[in-house]
Amino acid sequence: MTSAAVNSRSAHRSWANAGAAGALVVALTAGAVAGTAVDATAQPRTNKAPNTQAPNAQALSAMTAALPNAQLTSAVVLVDGRDGRWSGTSGTGKLTTGELDGGRRPVAADGRFRIGSISKVFTATVLLQLSAEHRVDLDGTVQQYLPDALPAAYPPITVRQLLNHTSGLPTGGGLGGDDGGDQWFADHMDESWTPQQVVAEAVGRPMQFEPGTAQQYNGLNYFLAGLLVERVTHRSYAQEVNARILRPLGLHSTAVPAAGDTRLAHPTAHAYLAVPRPDGTGTEQVDVTEQSPWPWAEGGMVSSAPDLDRFLSALLRGRLLPPAQQAELFAVPDVPNFRNRNCDIGPTAGRACFSTALMRFTSPSGVVLWGKTGSRPGWTNGIFATPDASRDLVYSLTPTSRNGVPFAVQYGIASAAFDLDPH
């Protein structure tokens, strides 16, 4: 804990962590996972026929059923597109006293979860809309829009460099317990900081590299992006997201929680972390479902699988952005990857993989997907789609460690959804 920490039980504030990264940063690991029965009957709200079956339904069902184990309590998987739709759940929605006797609560396919860094896609979309309205210049500088946010010694950093993670700003930081483990988070999960506190603490360190010369995934970029939205519009970040995205698309399960609001109504499943028992005899599961929505514009939103499916499809199909800004979704800078495990996967490893809003993933077989991962303690999530949104994937998993879900498991879900490794 630093001296900047405060207790959000007595005040309305927001957590912040300048170094939060997506779940795909986890190194590739091997190993099978034990399974439980899949429930693919609960159908989320959708504009498409609810009983259609997407291709690969058998592989998706088997993959989803095999997910829960001692390190993963639940899974929600949704695949949607022009070829049909498939939705499945597995695991348990809430651990109960009768769990060892087979008692369990079902997982809600249309429930809500904390989406983590998928929030960045909403933030970038708002800024791209402001660019289309000529209220924000992507080539304008952070210093121009937020003159007091960065030290005078820092070089000019453009808005585009914030959004595509080529700013070179420092990463990490002491606020939010970035280096804390599962026990630390269980003890401090309702504490919070303001975005201004996070930025002020982070920019006390030197730049990582000259802006525009490399790419390093960095949550600090999106704290600044959120502050920029508020400075330009003179309205709150939540108001802008609601007016520009949530209401027009009818995303009724998606929200920017108010600072200090730890509630999560109608969750897909409760989230747990395994922490050591006080007597030293193994671990116990601590419910972390109700936690501070600390990452704000960087990673604090909540949503559901059907809502994220609708959002990603609308975004990729051009419903939210005009052509010039739509092109920014797929404009990955041609620069090296700088100490960034997110981009060290697939045939393009070592080069940048983030555009102004999305992450590009290329499978070993050459299939290109666009989307974003997002994690919070207790959740590992992802949204991915083909470039034309002909097929979308949304998944939300509840791991019992802040380390999240290994990439191998997430790749298995994507492989079943998109035929990444055809035989």
Image (tube, grey):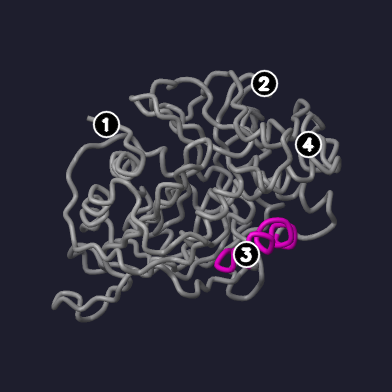
Magenta segment: does it hold 240?
Answer: yes
Left or right of residue 205: residue 90: left
Q: Quadrant of the C terminus?
A: top left
Per the model, the C-alpha gap separating discs 1 and 2 is 41 Å
| Count of picture labels | 4
Residue 179 appearing in the image: no
The image quarter containing residue 399 is bottom left
The image quarter containing residue 26 is top left
Residue type, mark 4 in image? Val
Instruction: Return the mark for residue 422.
Output: 1
- Determine whether the residue tagged by mark 1 lies in a helix, strand or loop: loop
- Tell me which label, 1 or 4, sits earlier in the chain: 4
Per the model, the C-alpha gap separating discs 4 and 3 is 32 Å
Instruction: Return the mark for residue 250.
Output: 3
Q: Give the residue number, with chain letter if any, for mark 2.
A: 210
Density class for disc 3 (Cα within 10 Å; few <14, some 14-19, many ≥20) is few
Quick check: marks 1 and 2 in contact, CB under 8 Å? no
- Mark closer to the observer (1, 4): 1
- Residue 332, placed above or below residue 285: above
Image coordinates for residue 403, horizontal then vertical, percent: 36, 48
Residue 157 appearing in the image: yes
Per the model, the C-alpha gap separating discs 4 and 2 is 15 Å
The secondary structure that dominates the magenta segment is: helix
Per the model, the C-alpha gap separating discs 1 and 4 is 45 Å
Q: Give the residue number, with chain letter if any, for mark 4.
A: 142
